[in-house]
Image: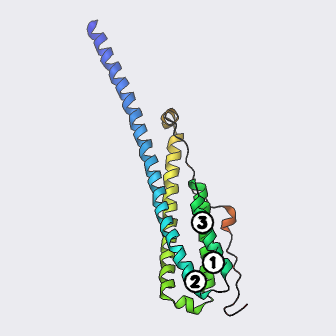
């Protein structure tokens, strides 16, 4: 009788340890996903900062050539300033879209200024900004994959039990605002116009 009681106690202890170990494994997996999501966001942030730093140089070069396009240059500068006020994924995504749209307009208008298009500094900065834009797009995709994986895990059984116990909250995907999906509208005065 004593031996059966001992076996039952050992089995109970093993079951309890197994359950604890299982929940610890789930918790650690959720933490890993959350940290990967945060890291992917930080990678986007680094690229956005690099692009942010290139914009004043680009505007300075363009100002000398694009005397009649001050409105476009002003939009680029205003879009850049949105980053200073952006908080969180949604506002940063909005600021990013504004900058992207303004840069598209600027680069399209640059086509009408042969001297600007031939400027090595402009070409270098245009190439750098384009490379950063491509990298940002890649990182956005990776960020959304990380967020999606995290959100799925915290909503699945049994992970949802651990997620609710430790207040894991759903994360927001990087989304493009519907107006930002529209084509860029470009209006310009020809070089030498009034």
User: Where does the N terminus fall, quadrant-wise?
Assistant: top left
Q: Is mark 3 on a helix, strand or loop?
A: helix
Residue 125, x across and y down, in percent: 49, 79
Instruction: Left or right? Give the position of 17 relative to 61.
Output: left
- Residue 73 numbered mark, or none: 1
Establish if 126 lies above or below 133.
below
* Residue in view at x 52 percent, y 69 percent: 52
* Residue in view at x 59 percent, y 80 percent: 107
Mark 3 vs 1, N-terminal side: 1
Q: Residues within 10 Å of mark 3 (few under 14, many from 20)?
A: some
* Residue in view at x 30 percent, y 18 percent: 10
Near-viewer residue (49 or 132): 49
Establish if 170 lies above or below 103.
above
Mark 2 vs 3, N-terminal side: 2
Q: Is mark 2 on a helix, strand or loop?
A: helix
Residue identifier under label 3: 81
User: Where does the C terminus fall, quadrant-wise?
Assistant: bottom right
Residue 178, x across and y down, in percent: 68, 62
CB atoms at circles 2 and 1 under 8 Å apart? yes
- Mark 2 vs mark 3, CA separation in Å: 18 Å
- Residue 62 numbered mark, or none: 2
């Amino acid at each position: 009788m004593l031996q059966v009681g001992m076996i039952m106690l050992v089995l109970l202890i093993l079951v309890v340890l197994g359950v604890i170990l299982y929940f610890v494994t789930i918790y650690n997996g959720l933490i890993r996903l959350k940290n990967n999501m945060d890291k992917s966001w930080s990678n986007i942030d680094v690229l956005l900062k690099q692009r942010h730093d290139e914009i004043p140089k680009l505007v300075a070069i363009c100002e000398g050539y694009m005397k009649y396009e001050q409105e476009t240059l002003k939009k680029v500068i205003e879009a850049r300033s949105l980053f200073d006020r952006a908080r969180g994924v949604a506002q940063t995504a909005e600021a990013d879209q504004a900058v992207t749209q303004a840069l598209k307009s600027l680069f399209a208008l640059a086509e009408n200024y042969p001297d600007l298009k031939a400027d090595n500094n402009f070409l270098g900065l245009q190439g750098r900004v384009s490379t950063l834009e491509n990298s940002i797009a890649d990182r956005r995709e990776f960020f959304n994959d990380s967020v999606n994986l995290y959100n799925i895990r915290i909503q699945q059984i049994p992970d949802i039990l651990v997620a609710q116990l430790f207040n894991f909250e759903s994360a927001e995907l990087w989304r493009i605002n519907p107006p930002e999906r529209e084509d860029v509208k470009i209006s310009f005065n020809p070089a030498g116009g009034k």
